[in-house]
């Protein structure tokens, strides 16, 4: 069991990314972790990696929105089950 401490804003971005990919936040974090471990063999600071991932996502979204005539992909709204 790993505990990850992030500011709320980063959790919000991770939730948006996960929803857009049809995953839970836990599934997204597991996928990102597995991919970086396969690529680099280690991940010394998971929280830092997730913060950078969020910032890269936000930067990419900003770039997409700045292109005239482009339509950014909107995340799927979260739905409460139960």
Image (spheres, helix red, strand yellow):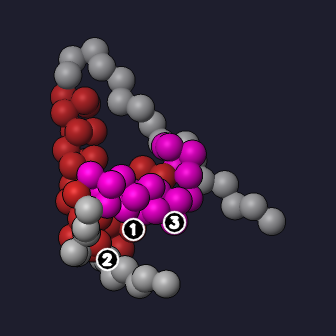
Graded by Cα atoms within 10 Å as few (under 14), some (14 to 19) or many (20 or more), the crowding at tag 3 reads few
Q: Is residue 78 magenta?
A: no
Span of residues in magenta: 19-39
Residue at x 80%, y 65% (from the top left corner): 82
Residue at x 19%, y 33% (from the top left corner): 63
- Mark sitting earlier along the chain (2/3): 2
Please tell me whether mark 3 sits on a helix, a strand or a loop.
helix
Q: Are marks 1 and 3 in contact (CB under 8 Å)?
A: no
35 vs 61: above or below: below
Q: Are marks 1 and 2 in contact (CB under 8 Å)?
A: yes
Q: Is residue 31 magenta?
A: yes
**Cα distance in 3D space between marks 2 and 3:** 14 Å
Q: Are marks 2 and 3 in contact (CB under 8 Å)?
A: no
Looking at the image, which is closer to me, 41 or 2?
41
Q: Nearer the viewer, mark 2 or mark 3?
A: 3
Graded by Cα atoms within 10 Å as few (under 14), some (14 to 19) or many (20 or more), the crowding at tag 1 reads some
82 on left or right of 28: right
Q: Which residue is mark 1?
A: 11
Looking at the image, which is closer to me, 3 or 42?
42
Residue 14 seen in the current view: no
Please tell me whether mark 2 sits on a helix, a strand or a loop.
loop
Q: Which residue is mark 3?
A: 26
Q: Which residue is mark 2?
A: 6
């Amino acid at each position: 069991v790993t505990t990850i401490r992030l500011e709320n804003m980063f959790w919000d971005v991770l939730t948006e990314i996960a929803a857009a990919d049809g995953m839970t936040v836990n599934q997204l974090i597991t996928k990102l972790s597995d991919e970086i471990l396969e690529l680099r063999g280690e991940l010394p600071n998971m929280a830092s990696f997730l913060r950078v991932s969020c910032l890269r996502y936000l930067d990419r979204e900003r770039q997409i929105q700045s292109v005239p005539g482009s339509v950014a992909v909107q995340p799927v709204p979260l739905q409460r089950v139960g």
